[in-house]
Image (cartoon, rainbow, N blue to C red):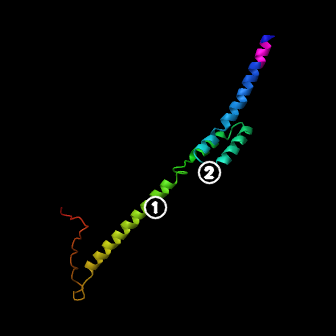
Amino acid sequence: MFLDYFALALLLFVAITLFYGIIAIHDIPYELAKERNHPQQDAIHVAGWVSLFTLHAIWPFLWIWATLYREDRGWGFQQEVHKAEHDLVDLRNGLSALTQRLDRLELFAEPSPNSKSDSKPSPVPPSADQPNARN
């Protein structure tokens, strides 16, 4: 008789522990989202409850969704955009430097009105920003 009650108590204990354990596990993505100040933490919480009915089939995706966002860097794409903007500024600066250099070269290469058409243009003097080829 004692073993019957002991088995019943053990069965109830295991059932209650599993029930609360599953509910606690389903809330882990929501807790992560709340800790990271995720902008969609309510949606993650609702999806966690929905995952109870799908036997936690979508739970790994909720974990990934909750961990993608961090408050210090957002979704992680700003650094790449900032790097691309920085590269674009570098390219524009390089292009303007090349344009200025080309304009200087064209000024020196233009033939003077007194020169003959078959004569060679005067040599271009090296500028201060050009390295000397002989060194």
Q: Residues within 10 Å of mark 1 (few under 14, many from 20)?
A: few
Q: Closer to the N terminus: mark 2 or mark 1?
A: 2
Task: Say which element carries label 1.
Answer: helix
Please give the count of numbered marks on the rendered protein.
2
For marks 2 and 1, give the one nearer the viewer: 2
| Quarter of the image where the N terminus is located | top right
Principal secondary structure, stretch drawn in magenta: helix
Q: What is the quadrant of residue 127 in the picture?
A: bottom left
Q: Is residue 84 left or right of residue 65?
A: left
Residue 7 highlighted magenta (yes or no): yes
Q: Name above or below for residue 62 compared with residue 133.
A: above
Which region shows up in magenta?
3-8
Name the residue beneath numbered marker 1. 85
Picture coordinates of residue 54 (x, y %)? 73, 39
Q: What residue do we see at 68% from left, 44% from top? A: 45
Q: What residue do we see at 75% from left, 21% from top? A: 11
Q: What residue do we see at 49% from left, 57% from top? A: 81
Tag 2–tag 1 contact (CB < 8 Å): no
Name the residue beneath numbered marker 2. 39
